[in-house]
Image: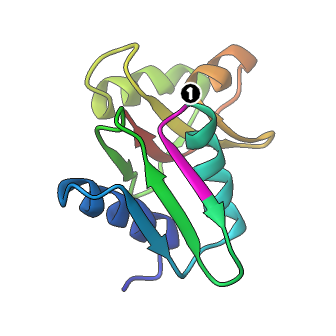
């Protein structure tokens, strides 16, 4: 078990998907991870419920892959396109999660608002 809670959670989601199961239970989580999962839930990739000591995540059928980006690259608005080509299989397929000064958002929102930030993960 590593120190990176986000990477651990996204790896567990992918392991459960590969095992052809639909639900995973996470014991270690943070508010930042919940914000990432909320963004994924808003876009329809997962569904989750937070209980007292654990987090139950249900995977939906349209999730192909989700992974943390390490090292976390700091990008400006002009550089986001380079990382879209690097991490996503097609231009309008999936999204990068960017941590900006205005909070977590997808790369499309960051481009529309003209914000750069730190790349956290990608989902498609």
Q: Residue furthest right?
A: 102
* Snapshot colouring: rainbow
The magenta-colored residue range is: 44-48
x, y percent for residue 10: 40, 59
Q: Is residue 29 visible?
A: yes
Identify the residue at image location x=50%, y=65%: 6
Q: Quarter of the image containing the N terminus?
A: bottom left
Closer to us: 111 or 28:
28
Location of residue 81 with respect to 40 vertically, above or below: above
Closer to us: 76 or 84:
84
Identify the residue at image location x=40%, y=61%: 23
x, y percent for residue 122: 42, 41
Q: Residues within 10 Å of mark 1 (few under 14, many from 20)?
A: many
Q: Is residue 117 visible?
A: no
Among the 4 quarters of the image, the one containing residue 77: top right
Task: Inspect the magenta stretch and tell me whether residue 95 lies in it.
Answer: no
Identify the residue at image location x=69%, y=14%: 112
């Amino acid at each position: 078990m590593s120190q990176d809670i986000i990477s651990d959670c996204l790896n567990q989601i992918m392991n459960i998907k590969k095992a052809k199961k639909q639900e995973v239970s996470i014991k270690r989580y943070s508010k930042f991870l919940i914000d990432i999962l909320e963004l994924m839930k808003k876009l329809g990739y997962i569904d989750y419920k937070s209980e007292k000591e654990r987090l139950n995540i249900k995977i939906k059928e349209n999730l192909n892959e989700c992974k943390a980006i390490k090292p976390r690259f700091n990008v400006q608005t002009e550089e986001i396109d380079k990382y879209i080509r690097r991490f996503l299989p097609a231009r309008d397929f999936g999204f990068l999660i960017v941590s900006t000064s205005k909070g977590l958002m997808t790369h499309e929102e960051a481009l529309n608002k003209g914000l750069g930030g730190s790349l956290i993960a990608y989902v498609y």
